[in-house]
Image (cartoon, rainbow, N blue to C red):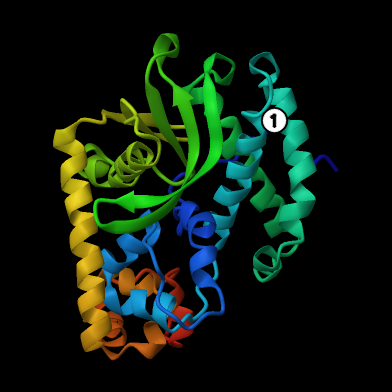
Amino acid sequence: MQLFDDGPFFDPDAPGAADADAVVEDAALSGTSASPPAYLSPSSASMYQQCPRRWRFRYIDRLPDPPGEAALTGTFAHRVLELLFQEPAAERTLVRARQLARDVWPETEGHPSYQALALDDAGARGFRWRGWLAIEGLWTVEDPALVQVKATERTVDTQVGDVPFRGVVDRLDYGAGGHGLVITDYKSGRAPTARYADSRLAQVLLYSAAIEASDGVRPSMARLVYLGQRVIDVMATDDVIRPVVDQLHSTWHAIKTDRETEEYTPKPGPLCAWCPYAARCDEGRAEILRRAELGLLPPTAPAVQALGLPIAS
């Protein structure tokens, strides 16, 4: 059976189409040490902004937060594209990408996080299809042979303002004609509507600020490449970078305050149904039950099984 070939399956609306970047970025933050993390990544900062209680469970208590199938699919696609863009420009073809996918697959298949999914044969084949079609989707939005790459999977460990910062940039490219730098970040989930596009750009704008702090040169543009869908980009000017740096500063100091007071006030809402710590959080559990009573809880939400809730017929 051929693992990676053409096929008619791609569902950008798949439940749990999560950001795979957290799987890579936070590996160093999720070790065995009981001490608080010494820096923020875009994903850890975003988690605190979403819910300080969840952040505490993850980064202070070090409770496991295993990546779901969608995030692992994205991680697989990221790895293949990383290797593809290390090839000479003329060799960045679909044929080469398929070869790389085959080479990378044993690494993914043998990883404990993938094994924990316990997929049957059909589920494993669906995983491979989704991974391949995310990879193939790159050609929908750009021609990789035309990209001038400076670095792939660039780790940035620096100070952004007064905040110790660490992140992993998918791609650092040269701009048109070799002038300037461009931050490029892949996304395998569904592209946001125009209403939410600005908030999704915060991550790549933080990377722009971090590259400037580390290298002394600010990228001129930041891009989110939604594989198989579209590109969202923004010029990396003071006007757009300053607010996200200010928010990072506010988040860092709010965390320091919570470490002193040990409050970590939760923010109950729709995402509680997808929180791996819902059973440990009274406020989150109450929010989930309230939504279930109102018929607002999707039957596919992980909390349905975690809390043993009846599934509406």
Residue 69 percent coordinates (x, y): 57, 60
Measuring from the top left, give residue 3's x and y in whole percent: 78, 42
Q: Is residue 10 above or below residue 276?
A: above
In the rendered image, which quarter contains the C terminus?
Answer: bottom left
Task: From the top left corner, tell me how far across and down residue 216 is, in percent.
Answer: 35, 33
Residue most toward the top? 177
The crowding category of the residue bearing disc 1, from other C-alpha atoms within 10 Å (few below 14, some 14 to 19, many at least 20), is: many
**Quadrant of the drawing holding the N terminus:** top right
Q: Secondary structure at mark 1?
A: helix
The residue under label 1 is 97
Seen from the viewer's position, the closer of residues 160 and 225 is 160
Q: Is residue 160 above or below residue 97?
A: below
Identify the image quadrant of residue 96.
top right
Q: Vertically, is 171 above or below 210? A: above
Please tell me which residue is depicted at 47% across the width and 25% down the height of the picture. 173
- Residue at x 22%, y 49% (from the top left corner): 245
Taking the spot 21% from the left edge, 58% from the top edge, the residue there is 249
In the figure, residue 89 lies in which quadrant?
top right
Say if 289 sits above or below 44 in the image.
Answer: below
The three-letter code of the residue at mark 1 reads: Ala
At x 38% / y 63%, what residue is drawn?
Answer: 39
